[in-house]
Amino acid sequence: MENNLLAVLLLLPFCGSVLAFSLPSDRLRPWLLPLCGTLHLALTFLVIQGGRPLTTANGWLGVDPLSRLILLVISLLFCGCSFYALGYLRYRISWGNRTFVGCLLLFLSAMTLAAISRHLGILWVAVETTTVASAPLIYYNRNRLSIEATWKYLLLGSVGIALAMLGILFIAYAALAGNGHVSLQFDDILHGAASYSRPWLRAGFVFLLVGFGVKVGFAPLHTWKPDAYGEAPGLVGALLAGGLTSVAFLALLRTLQIMDAASEAVMAREAFLAMGLLSMAFAAVFVVRQPDFKRMLAYSSVEHMGILAIGISVGGVATFGAMLHLMNNALTKGVLFLAAGNIHRRFGSKKVDDVRGAITLLPFSATLFLLGFLAITGSPPFSPFISEFTILQGVFSGDHYVTGGLFLFFLAVIFIGMGSTVLSVVFGNPPEKKGDENYRETFATTGAPLIMLLIVLVLGVYLPDPVRHICADAAALLEVRP
């Protein structure tokens, strides 16, 4: 029964994608998104309840505490974006939506496969499928900048996934040179990692870190993010920033588990720390005086991937903070990108010089954008404050004072830089060129980000026991030492 549940969870969005490509009606097709999104979320709740490990007979698919957390994150985010899509696609009905709806559902299926994969080869295929499925979504606006962003995304993503493939091959060779038994099944790797050849295992880790790090968007591997996030529709940006990066980060956590099992945790965590600090530094530099508010959100994504890496590298209570922050970041990015998409459509521009006084013309979206900014920069009482504070607590309690000082410095610079851009967009007098004056806010385009913001607010005031247990179990899995 439980194995069947995993199969249904995986096949539901895939079958929805096939149906979307075959359904002739552009008006009915978007309704497949909230239908599949709601059912996927309901099935996810069934999968994660109880906390028992689930594994298929061959061991290639399964659910552990990390899978539960990632499934919950991507399902919540997609469900919110699916209802937003109804309002978004209604304004673009003449463009057609067959490819858009079909690829969105295929994207959800690929992320689900990555989350429940217990085989490095399947994980690699799933992450690569997310690239193929999301590329047409980035090109949806069909202009010169969007095609440029799509090709850059495909090119860099393909290079990254090729490097990850080399990393998997090196790990396989490490097994062959060590105990002579080669298996890419994750549990087999963890069981035999202690006997793997150390040089080949370390080489495999480096290639996996760089390869999947491209998908995560660590600096300086992040160069596809500003273009892709800037040119993609808001709901696609939300799914990339909160969904794709979470799935790719899960792939990196799997490599960390392998290194832990091989008693190579020190090297792995030092690499995570270096990538985390470098990512925050890059974000701090490029977010200041950023003239494009959607590209600003891309650099914010780079920052928060860095925060996650730092939390994982420090360990202890910081690991729990990182797991909680993974969820907080995804939901808050959903608020910001959906609100930014509304502002972009109303003003017909994402340049700060062309967008002012948004709160006058779009009071709900502008307010959500402002509150989302406060949340993502770690302002109380929103939940990112709790997770970032927990990571900082772990950093300083572990006597990592230099890391803690840099962490706080980068947070302050990014807060000031983002604040300057966000306040310019939200307040002031609207420009004479007002873009699409026929655009109106509706519950379909503001309801989903509002609900996500309320979740972020509630999690900042009160952390329910089920959420606490999911994050704590995921953190404990990363803290296991042989």
Image (tube, rainbow, N blue to C red):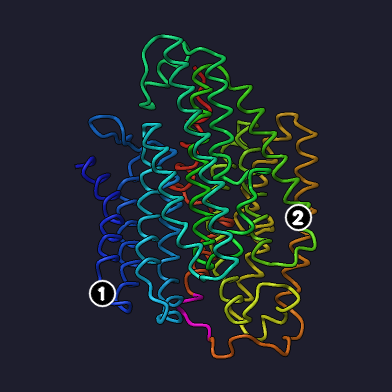
The number of discs equals 2
- Identify which residue is drawn at 53% across, 34% down: 163
- Identify which residue is drawn at 69% across, 88% down: 433
**Is the Cβ of the residue at disc 2 closer than 8 Å to that at disc 1?**
no
Amino acid on which the number 1 mark rests in the picture: Pro
In-image side of 65 versus 205 (left or right) = left
Image location (x, y in percent) of residue 63: 35, 38
The residue labelled by disc 1 is 24
The residue labelled by disc 2 is 286
Between disc 2 and disc 1, whose residue precedes? 1
Q: Nearer the viewer, residue 19 or 146?
A: 146
- Identify which residue is drawn at 70% across, 41% down: 392
Spatial separation of the CA atoms under disc 2 and disc 1:
44 Å
Considering only vertical position in the picture, is 140 above or below 153?
Answer: below
In-image side of 100 versus 335 (left or right) = left
Image location (x, y in percent) of residue 31: 32, 72
Considering only vertical position in the picture, is 277 above or below 96?
Answer: above
Q: Secondary structure at mark 2?
A: helix
Q: For residue 184, which quarter of the picture? A: top left
Q: Which residues are magenta?
A: 440-446
Can residue 481 be found in the magenta stretch?
A: no
